[in-house]
Amino acid sequence: MTDRTQGADGGAARAVGAKGPDELRLQIERTRRQLGDTVEELAAKADVKGRARARATDLRDKAGAMTVQLRSTAAQAGHRAQEKVSHAGHRAQEKASRVGHRAQDGAGQVGRRTQEKAGQTRQQVRETAGQAGDRVQRTAGRAGRSVARPVSDAVQACRSHPRTVMIAGAAGAALVTLALLARRRTRCP
């Protein structure tokens, strides 16, 4: 055995000598292990096909993990969108409900006003019919004819059937209103 070995730089390096056969065996065993590890590393580096398979497996695992992550993210985004749409739908429904209540309140007010106007119109029609009947009676009395009975029957019929008079009055008021609106539209550009 020699006390000198060749170093990594090509120069001679002084090897530490073994002090006995047991220590020499240990050094040999250690060197064999190091040499075996070095050979395995070189073989792994030289095994291009194996390295490619290992890289492909790593990439496949990463792609699988990425797919799971993307699906999870997409599901979360879908849930968030569904929640937003649901909230928007509820808000729209609430607004529509409020608008419906306002329209209903407005229609109720219009109905009350119409009833009031109809009541006023009915009273005016009664008064006008009574006055007309009185005039006709006076005129007939002056003329020397007696038409009191037919006029009084007409007045009595109006008083006994106020609904018919009210409907006729409301129809007349509606016609006058429509005529005024039509006239207004033709004047306003």
Image (cartoon, helix red, strand yellow):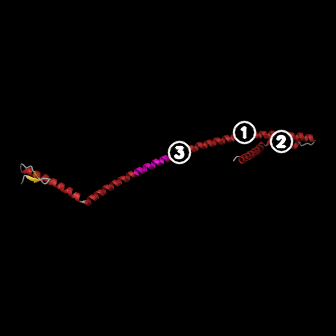
The answer to the question of whether label 3 and label 2 lie on touching residues, with beta carbons closer than 8 A, is no
Of mark 3 and mark 2, the one earlier in the sequence is: 3
Look at mark 3 in the image and give the residue it sits on.
Answer: 90
First along the sequence among labels 1 and 3: 3
The residue sitting at 22% across, 59% down in the picture is 46
Viewer-side residue, 20 vs 101: 20
Quadrant in which the N terminus is drawn: bottom left
Drawn side of residue 57 relative to residue 33, left or right:
right
Question: Which kind of residue does numbered mark 3 sit on?
Answer: His
- In this picture, which residue range is highlighted in magenta? 71-84
Residue 91 is a magenta residue: no
Question: Badge 2 is on which residue?
Answer: 155
139 left or right, relative to 79? right
State the residue at coordinates (81%, 42%): 158
- Distance between mark 1 and mark 2 Cα atoms: 23 Å
Residue 100 on image: x %, y %:
60, 44
Q: Which residue has dot 1 on it?
A: 116
Mark 1 belongs to which amino acid?
Answer: Glu
